[in-house]
Every structure is written in C-alpha cells, then in structure tokens.
Amino acid sequence: MAKRKATKRKKGKKDFQIGFVGVGRMGANMALNLNDKGFNISAVFDANRRAARSLAKGLGCAAPKTLAEVTALSDVVITVVTDDAAMRSVFSTSGDSLLTDAKGTTFINCATISPAVHVQVEDRAAAVGASSLEGCMASSITQARQGTLYLMCGGKRSVFNRVRPILDALSVDLRYIGPAGQAAQVKALVNMVMNINTAGLAEGLGLGQALGLDLKTLMKVFSQTGANSRVLETDGEDMTIRDHECYFSADHAAKDSGIALALARQNKLSLPLAQATKRQYDKMKKLGLGDLDKSGIAELTFPGRKGSK
C-alpha cells in the first residue's frame, strides 16, 4: 500500500501507515498493540528475517527485504534497534536506508542510544525532508504489549503533536521533554539510577542470605524503610529464587550505564557508583550471563552462586 497524500485535518488511526524496524521483544509487542487498537501496520523489518515474516503473517502486513521498502510503504516508521551502530546503519546516508525517498516520512526512534546519535538522525532526516522524534521508553515487554509504556519524547514539538495519536496508543504516561537528545539524556539517567538500585539490592539481599536472615522478612522491612525502591518490587523475589527471565538484559544494562558515564565524562563529573555498577554488569557479560535479566546481577553477590567467588 502506498503512502497517502498528506492533509491538514487531524489524523485518525486509519490515516497512518506504520512501519516497524526492529521487531524483537519490544518492537513486536508494540506493533501487536497498535494493530489491536485499529492502526494500520504497513510493514515490519528485522535482521532476523524469520521473526519479521512470522510477525508480518500475524499482522497481515508486508515483511520487506530492504529498509527502503519499509519507508516506501509507510508514512510513520517506528525503530527499536539495539545500539548506536545499528541506528546509524538504518539511517545511513548511502546504500539501503530508511532515508531513501523519505520526504514526508516521520520516524519515531525508541531505542536507548547516545543522545548525540538522536541529534544526528534528526539532522539526517531533515536533510531529505523527513522528520524524526525520539520516543524513549522506561518500561518493559508487558507494557509494550498492553500499550502502557512510559514514554519520554524529544525533538520538535510539531512532530510530537503530529504523531500524538500513535504515542498515546503506546503509552499510559507520555512526556514531551524538549529538543532532540534531551529525552535520551533523561532515559540514560533513569537507567543509570535503576541499575545502581538493582546492584545495591542484590548486595543487600546477598549479604542478608550470608547472615542467615529470612529474606522475605528482610524485603518487607526494606519496603517500609529508606531501602525501598521500585526495583525491590520488580526484582527482589526474582533475585531470591533465581528467576532471571529476561525483560531488560544485563547486556543492555551495561550499555545504558556506559551511555550515562559517557555523558558524565563530557561534563567532567565522576560517578563512582555508576562506574562500579557498570563493572558488575560487564562481569556478567564476561561470565556469559549477559542475556539474563538485570536481576541476574544477584548471581554475583549471593553466596555460592556462579559469579560470587
């Protein structure tokens, strides 16, 4: 299906043709949610061609072999890629690229990447007559599927307003932060603090087990005192029973702490807690535990576990 001619009237669900690039755990569930809510999903693309074809079959949409085809079929493209290199690749200025014949296309970029790359992508999009918005997510797989993401957006306010119906359908809490790069800065700080909290909780519970304390009681005390945190709610029990099904991987935790530390270096700040946390997640990667959920950091602190020696 070709792109529809732009009109000045306010767009409804059926007026958007939405493509997805990156349909892993988050991207696929975002596409399914929008489809359930009556939006037109025009195309899905992923380096894992089998995953893209399988999702496309369920959605009744195309699974193009090239990025340029995704743009040709869509007026809005949502990207959920892994890192800075992947982002630069899909928005390459040569070869197969989402920027091919992209005039009039709006890109919503949801990956956690360096703020400077979001700014670079906005510039590249503008150079071909397209628009770019960062849609940074502070949520996980369940929220992606249910359309209850916490979304932080950066870019031009006019672009944010243009795709607001899509953003509202994806989220339960939506915030416009400011110009390109600023939402990514906020997201980097969110994940830095979350990772520090996760590492601290793993150490507290690990020491509690070494002392022979009842961990259920310990967690109840934590929840009623200054030791409370959202991470206690989401990861505490998982740490004690070693259930590390992946919602946010240790690999990603290491990457995101690295983004925050790079921002700190640029501003000549020393962040020793963030540095120590990143070393722990890097250690998980070296031990082959990087694909575990971030709660798997408990494997480094609980006595008798693989990485605690």
Image: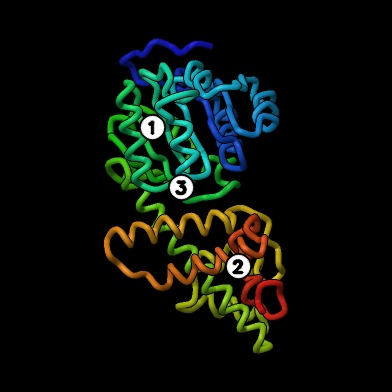
Judged from this view, the residue extending furthest toward the bottom is 211
Mark 1 neighbour class, 10 Å CA radius: few under 14, some 14 to 19, many 20 or more:
some
Q: Cα distance, mark 2 to mark 3?
A: 20 Å
Residue 41 spot, x, y in % from top left? 55, 23
Around disc 2, counting alpha carbons within 10 Å, would you say few (fewer than 14), some (14 to 19), or many (20 or more)?
A: many
Amino acid type of the residue that numbered disc 1 sits on in the rendered structure? Arg
The residue drawn where x is 41% and y is 24% is 99
Identify the disc placed on residue 112.
3
Helix, strand or loop at label 3? It is: loop
Residue indicated by mark 2: 297
Which of disc 1 and disc 3 is earlier in sequence?
3
Q: At which x and y percent is residue 184?
A: 37, 48
Q: Please tell me whether mark 2 sits on a helix, a strand or a loop.
A: helix
Which sits earlier in the primary sequence, circle 1 or circle 2? 1
Q: What residue is shown with label 1?
A: 164
Under tag 1, what secondary structure? helix
**Residue shown at 57% from the left, 77% from the top:** 203
Closer to the camera in the image, 300 or 230: 300
Residue name at image x 39 percent, y 10 percent: 5
Please name the amino acid that badge 2 sits on: Ile
Nearer the observer: mark 3 or 1; the answer is 3
Q: Are marks 2 and 3 in contact (CB under 8 Å)?
A: no
**Quarter of the rendering occupied by the N terminus:** top right
Residue at 34% of width from left, 57% of height from top? 263
- Asked if the residue under mark 1 is in contact with the one under mark 3, i.e. CB atoms within 8 Å, the reply is no
Q: Amino acid under label 3? A: Thr
Q: Which percent across, then down, holds residue 91? A: 43, 31
